Image (cartoon, rainbow, N blue to C red):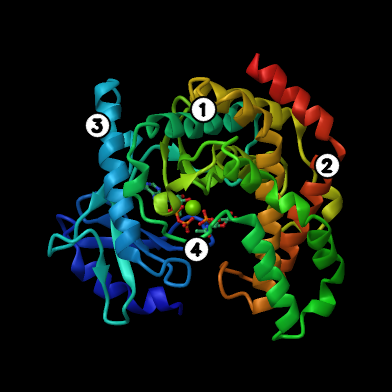
Amino acid sequence: MTIAEQTLHEALDAFDFGAAVAEVVRAGQGHINDTFRIRTVDGRLFTLQRINPVAFKRPDHVMENILGVTEYLREKIRRAGGDPARESLQVVRDRNGNAFFTGSAGDAWRVFRFISDVDCLQSASTAEQFAASGRAFGRFQSLLDGYPADTLHETIPRFHDTEDRLAKLKTAVAEDRLGRARDCGEEIAFALRREPDCSKALDAMRAGILPLRVTHNDTKLNNVLLDKKTGEGICIIDLDTVMPGLSIYDFGDSIRFGANHCAEDETDLSKVSLDLDLFAAYTAAFLEGSGHTLTEKEVEYLPWGAKLMTLECGIRFLTDYLEGDVYFRTSRPGQNLDRARTQFKLVSDMEAHWDELSAIVNNAAK
Ligand code: ADP
Ligand code: GN1
Ligand code: MG
């Protein structure tokens, strides 16, 4: 039994679901939080989550960000004639009126209203599905355009600081606490050869070429809920890492996860490749969703967003493998190394198709 399952009963008691709880099932395939779907005897649905304490040291900061952002979004959605209950997460407070509950083991739990009649996909079967997620993430960014960025806490310090991620990999290799570095010499070398790349977006940000915006920072396909009837992306979820960031990160992380046809931990690397049609579909949709508000430079750097998020995620998986799988949830030995390998295969593919990626982006931006 996981820690979350052992302490679940305390969390269930801490919230008023309006009726007795009839069913609790694990939900979703996220790598970080523990998510449960709650059904009451009268059919009400909720999402109960244990916030991962390894990833998030300050759940109070996470929840302050989420309350601020969701209230802001709901108001904007309402004014645009939308349905805030379906198009934005809504926090349900605990019996004491708090945005989260701290259990006896010190772990933080929160509840959201469950959004029904949606699909949450692990991979896109059609370009249109992937485009729907792109429109939704683009729109999310543009809706938050006026949000006071300086009120947001940095919930994970240096989250997309690729230079720092590489430095952490070097430390993990040097320490090699579990003697795993010998299994992944090639992967370590792959990352180290790309050290100059790790500064590409950060240099542009430091030089004022790329503006800081309020970004989601974790734009996987399974962090958007698609309406079952229309197929459109209606609600962006997993708001734990909404922080000031670069627009190209949100674009790039979606490409990393969704512009291919295999699982993140696919072991047959011959199956792993970047799908240029999916890349094109997402690019056009993301620009459309963001209302074509990205600057010329942001558009020019989009392929860098894709490559950097993929490289960085590979570096993070590899670091976690070397450190003993302490951050990303794993269900089998070697899974984080397999994940790192797929990411690096995708990076190689992006490098091989670099000119095409730029051409697709230019074409979409016309
Ligand atoms: P993680 O950080 O572990 O990825 P998420 O917040 O993304 O956690 O939630 C995990 C999964 O739970 C999602 O991919 C989605 O399938 C489901 N989920 C989360 N919140 C809701 C919600 N409010 N309504 C419906 N499904 C949800
Ligand atoms: C994690 O929480 P989830 O599964 O949506 C991670 C992302 C990684 C992703 C890789 C807070 O996302 O940064 O890109 O796994 N989230 C956090 O799949 O670290
Ligand atoms: Mg998630």
For this rendering, which residue is in front, 94 or 206?
206
Q: CA distance from mark 2 to mark 4?
A: 29 Å
**Residue 62 position in % (x across, y down):** 35, 58
**Residue 154 position in % (x across, y down):** 42, 57
Instruction: Give the left or right position of residue 277, taking residue 232 as reference.
Output: right
Q: CA distance from mark 1 to mark 2?
A: 26 Å
Kind of residue at disc 2 = Glu
Mark 3 C-beta closer than 8 Å to ligand 1: no
Measured along the vertical axis of the image, is residue 48 above or below residue 244?
A: below
Q: Residue at x 60, y 41 (%)?
A: 207
Mark 2 or 4, which is nearer the eye?
2
Kind of residue at disc 3 = Glu
User: Of marks 3 and 2, which one's residue comes earlier in the chain?
Assistant: 3
Q: Are marks 1 and 4 in contact (CB under 8 Å)?
A: no
Q: CA distance from mark 3 to mark 4?
A: 29 Å
| Residue 227 visible in the current orientation | no
